[in-house]
Image (cartoon, rainbow, N blue to C red):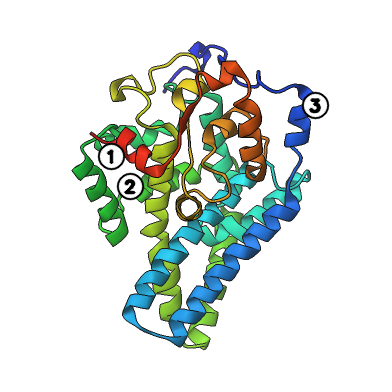
């Protein structure tokens, strides 16, 4: 629909690090990735255990919130697989990313990779596939927006009455060249196994209320806030996706705040999104260190869009 041939060479990608430094930063972080995934599944498992040991309604509500943020964290870990940052072996990279993260979230990492790599290459231009959200629901991405509308939108995510847009999200995550059936069968197998265990142990409501419900509420809320932080409110809405030249420094924001907020909404340094777009081969675990190195360069420091708290982010996203 859009002609990628008209997109000019990017302004700044890859020009701040020498080859040796980039090579060091870009080493796969398999051990740290496995520890992070183990931590997230441990938190999820313990949350489910606590909710079943003390079945108070308010504890289950809190459990939905906790597990939703950890599902989002697993999505961040699957994103590492999209960029082959888990293992040098593409086979092991995708196998680990799928079975330990993406399949439980109902998509394959190979399909996520298809559109996401195009997003990196044609960021904020007419051929950026992430424009689908703006095209389908422009009022949701019309930043800055009135503060009342912003918080009402987040509330609708939380209570699960505003999920038609998930269809668009799943279309983005399921653009897979080749046969989708093997991945569909593996995802069905994994969730069927979980359902079977839940039924046999008398915990089917644990699967429904503490896995499926967070997946379509809190996880989407975290995704919305993080996505808005990454690329929204940096330019006038009518100018988004009109660029003919990729300019990461003008269209991407790094946001960080207190450790608790980052743990809940932007875990594992994923909030350093400007650094990620400039150097997607760098694992998230090194993005904070990369940020410190880049900030010492005047050409980067002057133009970098850095928001130093989520409270400040809300001010930038709302009127």
Check if mark 2's residue and mark 1's residue have beta carbons within 8 Å.
yes
Question: Quick check: 240 above or below 65?
Answer: above
Q: The N terminus lies in which quarter of the figure?
A: top left
> Observer-nearest residue: 177 or 73?
73
Badge 2 is on which residue?
165
From the viewer's perspective, is the residue at label 1 or at label 3 nearer? 3
Residue at screen point 47% across, 31% down: 306
* Circle nearer the N terminus (1, 3): 3
> Observer-nearest residue: 9 or 164?
9
* Circle nearer the N terminus (2, 1): 1
From the viewer's perspective, is the residue at label 2 or at label 1 nearer? 1
Secondary element type, mark 1:
helix
Badge 1 is on which residue?
140
Which label is found at residue 20?
Answer: 3
Secondary element type, mark 3:
helix
Residue at screen point 31% across, 58% down: 158
Q: Position of residue 52 (x, y in %)?
A: 45, 84
Q: Is residue 2 left or right of residue 137?
A: right
Q: Is residue 190 left or right of residue 92?
A: left
């Amino acid at each position: 629909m859009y002609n990628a041939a008209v997109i000019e060479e990017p302004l700044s990608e890859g020009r701040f690090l020498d080859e040796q430094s980039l090579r060091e930063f870009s080493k796969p972080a398999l051990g740290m990735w496995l520890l992070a995934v183990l931590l997230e599944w441990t938190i999820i498992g313990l949350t489910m255990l606590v909710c079943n040991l003390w079945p108070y309604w308010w504890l289950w509500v809190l459990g939905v919130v906790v597990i939703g943020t950890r599902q989002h964290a697993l999505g961040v870990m699957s994103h590492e697989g999209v960029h082959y940052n888990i293992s040098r072996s593409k086979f092991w990279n995708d196998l680990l990313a799928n079975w330990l993260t993406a399949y439980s979230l109902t998509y394959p990492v190979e399909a996520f990779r298809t559109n996401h790599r195009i997003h990196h290459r044609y960021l904020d231009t007419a051929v950026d596939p992430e424009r689908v959200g703006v095209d389908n629901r422009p009022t949701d991405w019309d930043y800055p927006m009135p503060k009342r509308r912003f918080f009402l939108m987040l509330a609708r995510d939380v209570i699960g009455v505003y999920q038609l847009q998930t269809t668009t999200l799943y279309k983005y995550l399921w653009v897979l060249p080749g046969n989708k059936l093997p991945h569909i069968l593996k995802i069905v197998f994994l969730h069927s196994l979980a359902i079977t265990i839940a039924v046999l142990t008398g915990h089917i409501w644990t699967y429904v209320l503490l896995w499926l419900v967070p997946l379509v509420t809190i996880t989407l809320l975290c995704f919305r806030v993080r996505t808005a932080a990454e690329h929204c409110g940096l330019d006038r809405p009518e100018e988004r996706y009109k660029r003919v030249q990729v300019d990461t420094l003008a269209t991407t924001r790094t946001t960080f705040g207190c450790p608790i907020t980052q743990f809940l909404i932007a875990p594992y340094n994923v909030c350093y999104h400007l650094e990620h777009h400039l150097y997607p081969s760098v694992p998230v675990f090194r993005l904070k260190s990369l940020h410190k190195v880049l900030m010492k360069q005047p050409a980067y420091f002057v133009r970098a869009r850095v928001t130093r708290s989520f409270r400040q982010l809300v001010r930038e996203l709302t009127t």
